[in-house]
Image: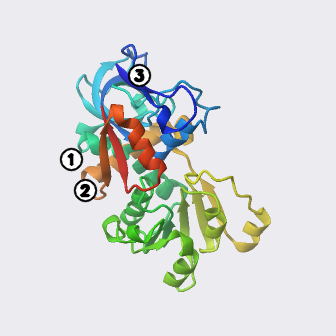
Amino acid sequence: MKAIIIDRPGGPANLQLREKPDLQPAPGMLTIDVAYAGVGYFEVLLSRGDFISAFPMPLTPGLEVSGYVRAIGEGVKGFYIGQPVASMTLHDLNGFASMANVRPDLTVPLDQLGADLDLATAAASIVNLTTAYLTIKEVNRMRTGDSVLVHAAVGGLGSFLGQMAKRLGAGKVFGTVGSVEKVKLAESLGYDELFVRTDFVEQTLRATEQKGVHAVFDPVGGSMRKQSLEVLCPLGQLVVVGNASGEQDVINSYNQIWFSNKQFAGFTLGGYSDSNPVETGKAAREALGMLARKEIHVEIQGVYPLENAAEALALLEEKNTVGKLVLKI
């Protein structure tokens, strides 16, 4: 089998394509022939060595894959050889490879969604779309008519957060982007309005008649955290879902949160799926079903061969992408 290897920190340039022994499924696991792998900013951070304590090198990156069931481990039921599936490799990574061992609980049979969903779209969507679904429905518990703000609104996760909020009943959905050019994408992604990140506080308060929004979803981090508190209405919630900026954590006063009647929450799909794998898999099926029924759509900016994985990560590192990138294995 072919696999991308990162054996030392240094960024996307250190990715190498190598041959590895073919996989066999352990008991309770599935082996799939990978057709596509999703590419996200997490892989950029991995290549820099940001998570080396949790994921020591050498490693094969990749959190999400699609393909066909190759072999079924002892005790696994509900799958068949050749079945089209999408899976989240959140704990073991190894998605940037021609074969992957995956957990059945985190694997969705694509032929059971009730509508067609192609393999590239499934691989591009399963992690971010499941994250968006759980963040809005279970973490924020958004109510019908709530107004929300999404940072990095046209990125891989942000583009799903905005659409999912609309799909689940939000009133007004606003977002922030890094450039004026990206503001033009508002309507296609379900946003009522997009604001350039540098002046989002003023623009959000203007759009809400100084009332603020009920929730802010932040995958960016850094100074955006404190600024986001300024646009929350009383009892509004800031939900932290990433730190794509790579900036140092921002310390907030709990007394300030207390006095201002604001709320904090956090969500990471990997950690949640550790303790709640069945619930995570169910959410993935629900979310991909929405995608298959065309209730939500994914923006795929580019499809790259596996050997060009470094090029895809370098493009993400420049933070000049819209939607998602995928690798064709």
Report, in whole angstroms, how far the alpha carbon at label 1 lies from the one at label 2. Answer: 9 Å
Say which quadrant the N terminus sits in. top left
Disc nearest the viewer among 1 and 2: 2
Report, in whole angstroms, how far the alpha carbon at label 3 lies from the one at label 2. Answer: 31 Å
Q: Quick check: 53 above or below 252?
A: above
Mark 1 near mark 2, Cβ–Cβ under 8 Å? yes
Q: Where is residue 292 in the image (x, y as percent from the top left)?
A: 25, 50
Give the residue pinned by disc 2: 294
- Taking the image as shown, residue 114 lies to the left or right of residue 254, namely left
Give me the residue at 53% from left, 39% from top: 270
Mark identifier at residue 29: 3
Which is nearer the N-term, disc 3 or disc 1? 3
Instruction: Check disc 1 and give the amino acid type.
Output: Ala
Which is nearer the N-term, disc 3 or disc 2? 3
Mark identifier at residue 115: 1
Give me the residue at 38% from left, 57% from top: 322
